[in-house]
Image (tube, rainbow, N blue to C red):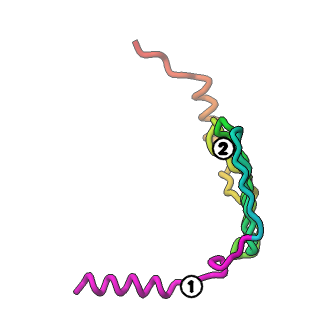
């Protein structure tokens, strides 16, 4: 009985989820060009979602993607993915707060005074 109630609750929650216009987005343009020396790809939809990327035969990729947030702000992210990992950049990404002065001084002191090697 419990399983039946649980299944009905899950189905009810799934049916109650709102379906946004994003589920009906149409592709305005799409380009996929795969070559032996790399690839170029892009996609744009009518609800202002887009992506563009290119890569080479070594696996290095650079590109960007964007969308409009629920608040109406255009979010754009540019990135590079190479031997140094994934490196995104965007004005919309959170930024760490500055290191407090006391901690910075401590780090500088530790770097200037390394521990003695153990024998």
Main SS of the magenta part reads helix
User: What is the quadrant of residue 13 in the picture?
Assistant: bottom left
Which is nearer the eye, 86 or 102? Answer: 86
Residue 7 occupies quadrant? bottom left
Q: Position of residue 8 (x, y in %)?
A: 35, 87
Q: Does residue 80 appear left or right of residue 2 in this picture?
A: right
Between 81 and 44, which is closer to the camera in this rendering?
44
Secondary structure at badge 1 equals loop
The residue sitting at 66% across, 81% down in the picture is 21
Task: Tell me if residue 29 can be seen.
Answer: yes
Tag of residue 18: 1
Label 2 crowd (10 A; few <14 / some 14-19 / many >=20)? some
Which secondary structure lies at badge 2? strand
Residue shown at the point (70%, 71%) measured from the top left: 69
> Which x, y percent locates residue 11?
40, 84
Q: Residue furthest left?
A: 1
Q: Residue at x 74, y 50 (%)?
A: 40
Q: Name the residue rendered at 63%, 81% in the picture.
A: 20
Say whether residue 77 is visible.
Answer: no
CA gap, disc 1 and disc 2: 35 Å
| Front residue of 80 and 37 | 37
Give the side of residue 15 with respect to residue 56, left or right: left
Count of marks placed on residues: 2
Residue linked to disc 2: 81
Span colored in magenta: 1-27
The earlier-in-sequence mark between 1 and 2 is: 1
Q: Which mark is residue 84?
A: none
Say if the magenta span includes residue 4.
Answer: yes
Q: Position of residue 54 (x, y in %)?
A: 73, 47
Q: Position of residue 47 (x, y in %)?
A: 73, 74
Q: Is residue 28 above or below residue 34?
A: below
Task: Classify 10 Å Cα crowding around label 1: few (below 14), some (14-19), many (20 and above).
Answer: few
């Amino acid at each position: 009985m419990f399983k039946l109630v649980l299944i009905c609750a899950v189905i009810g929650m799934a049916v109650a989820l709102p379906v946004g216009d994003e589920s009906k987005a149409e592709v305005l343009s799409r380009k996929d060009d795969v070559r032996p020396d790399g690839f170029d790809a892009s996609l744009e939809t009518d609800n202002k979602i887009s992506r563009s990327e290119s890569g080479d035969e070594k696996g290095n990729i650079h590109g960007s993607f964007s969308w409009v947030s629920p608040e109406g702000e255009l979010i754009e992210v540019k990135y590079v993915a190479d031997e140094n990992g994934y490196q995104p950049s965007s004005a919309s990404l959170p930024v760490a707060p500055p290191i407090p002065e006391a901690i910075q001084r401590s780090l500088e002191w530790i770097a200037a005074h390394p521990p003695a090697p153990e024998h």
